[in-house]
Amino acid sequence: MNKTKLIVVALIVLAVLSYFTLDLGQYLTLEFAQTRLSSIQDYKNENFAQTAILYFTGYVIATALSIPGAIIITLLGGAIFGLLWGTILVSFASSIGATLAFLVSRVLLRDWVESKFGDYLAPLNRGIEKDGSFYLFSIRMVPLFPFFMVNLLMGLTSIRTTSFYLASQIGMLIGTAVYVNAGSELAQISSLSGLVSAPVILSLVLLGVFPLIAKLILNGIQRNKVMKNYSRPKNFDANVVVIGAGSAGLVASLITAGAKAKVILIEKHRMGGDCLNTGCVPSKSIIRSGRIMSYIRRAKEFGIESAEGRVNFPAVMARVQDVIKTIEPHDSVERFTSLGVEVELGDAVIESPYTVSVNNRRIHTRSIILATGARPLVPPIPGLESIDYLTSDSIWSLTELPKRLLVVGGGPIGCELAQAFSNLGSEVIQVDMAERIMPREDEEVSELIMDAFRKQGISLLTHHKLQKFGSDNGVDFMEAEHDGETVRVEFDKVLLAIGRKANVENFGLEKLGVALNPQGTVQVNEYLQTNFSNIYACGDVAGPYQFTHMASFQAWFASLNAMLGGIWRSKINYNVVPWATFTDPEVARVGLSEQEAKEKSIAYEVTRYDMDHHDRSLADGEAHGFIKVLTVPGKDKILGVTIVGYHAGELIGEFVFAMTHGMGLKKISAVTHIYPTLLEANKFAANAWRNQRLPEKYFPWLEKFFAWRRN
């Protein structure tokens, strides 16, 4: 406990002891106030300023320490100083005292509450940042909520101190005036129950609830303002129309159909979207072929002589297509039709919030879900249009292995495909304008992957800014600026892997006026609603995470809210978001990285387990990488995990489960893991956390105890 907390605790303890030791509660009763009223008024008439200062100070202290009796002190203020001065003194004293109580709660309890319940408070804090002052103002006007509890609870949130004070000052003004005015009749008041009667309470409650009702009305007006230009059909052909049959759209359709609601799924190209046809499935298939070739080159490590392999690139690409075809029936029109989803193949156009047209058919629907995905971003680089460039969409059309492949981009897609083609035999040059590849990960992670890439022959050109593309005598080249000099790289094929752009064009969003984020994704709220209350978006088109598993995660909330909009809504949260990059070694992460924790000034402790001596990793010839766990200081609560190594994408699952269900490292340590498995490494990482916290100061005593037992 730091010095500030010790001082605050000491002052509180002193005040509490004084309250009970000196029996100060006797002075905060109606009887005492009435018997001393005349003498206090006489003293005030002779010493107004002194009386006001004493009263003001006492009120501030009582409120700051949450001492019961605020009503009596308020009534006394009205009886002594009258309505005007009483209201002024009580208003400022109560607000200042409330702010002090708020600060005491923040200093003493907020860190502890954040460490225990930070994940649950995150949505509340986001709401506080957006509308905290408004809701505090409303609560201050409602005497049903004990003000001392409001002070303490708000201290645990992220609301700014100035916002708390101003909302309290204004919000409590009317209630203060009511009680101060009642205090002018203090001598005639027989009991507090008469003062705080049901009619008085009801009047103040209605007054306090009015701003909340007003906001709901304003929100309704705002929604109606957006929707008023569009006539609402008397009958609907569907409960939900889903546009896009990628991961998000397929999951949203299945959930809607599973709930027995009428859903129509529209896809303009291929069922399964990017993940099946140009993304996850083909990339992991070619990574596997490349990995097999890398094992052949490493055969001597495993005692195998004369192992040889020759890459048949057309066969590799044929295998990629075979894998796609094997999985394709899972996402087919036939399967989804059999599960109750009506599928339309064609270009969807949103004519209104209630109408979608496709194939000369106009569909009236209660809700629309946008799941149109994203496409590779093609930057406006001079000369690019003059060469035959590739993207993660078009690279699967290759029938010949590029001898020299230039990969532009150091993110997950660029890294995975750069290594895969290198394993298959291409001479790969990877270029990125950042200082390192995989810049979202910790620097040591990037360095480990870069070292692995260099060892297998990939040429890394980081901190290179693209200037132009061109072609000389049939040879394509790229020019980039590096430390003030121009670097020229010749290549046979170039893969652009520098990001993805949301698909928001050419199906009616522009004309309708659906709001977009600066990044080009559809703007949605915590319910995945757009600025049209019955139009939702999920997956890559909405962001912020462009992962297949997050698209499915969002689809759950979007479909539920689309089906039940106006009756019930469920907020989405991003407290636990995992991902993996399938390089060799793999990189997997969930929660905070150490880099992010530093950037956000979040306190943390690091526990690290290196895989160098892990039995199964040694047996498999993959004893490299590490598990790094960030925890709350002094606690086993997991803030984030980064795993680099063999099958990291599988290992991360146990930590994702633990974080999702609020479990710490102690729980993982207590689980029996099969030996010898890679999963055991998670237990060793958890044990490493416990070992760092062994009570070593007691070890000499234990040694003496067991020596005594032996004798």
Image (tube, rainbow, N blue to C red):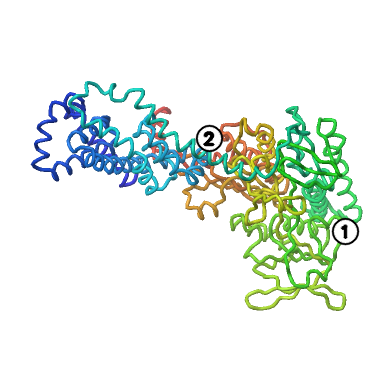
Side of 183 relative to 608 (left or right)? left
The picture quadrant where one finds residue 42 is: top left
For the question of whether residue 288 can be seen, the reply is: yes
Residue placed under numbered mark 1 in the picture: 398
Q: Which amino acid does label 2 sit on?
A: Lys
Q: Which of 506 and 248 is in front in this view?
A: 506
Percent position of residue 689, x then y: 52, 41
For this view, does 543 lie left or right of residue 200?
right
Q: Within 10 Å of the Cα at label 2, are there few (<14), some (14-19), or many (20+) other Cα atoms?
A: some
Q: Considering the image in quadrants, where does the N terminus appear?
A: top left
Residue type marked 1: Leu
Of the 4 image quadrants, the one containing the C terminus is top left
Residue 604 position, x and y percent, is: 48, 47
Residue 254 vs 189, above or below: the answer is below
The vertical placement of 99 against 560, above or below, is below
The answer to which image quadrant residue 405 occupies is bottom right
- The residue under label 2 is 666
Q: Where is residue 145 in the image (x, y as percent from the top left)?
A: 39, 31
Q: Which of marks 2 and 1 is nearer the N terminus?
A: 1
What x and y, as percent, mark residue 44? 12, 39
Residue at point 52%, 39% (across, down): 119
Among the 4 quarters of the image, the one containing residue 433: bottom right
Q: Which of marks 2 and 1 is in front?
A: 1
In depth, the one of 205 and 710 nearer the eye is 205
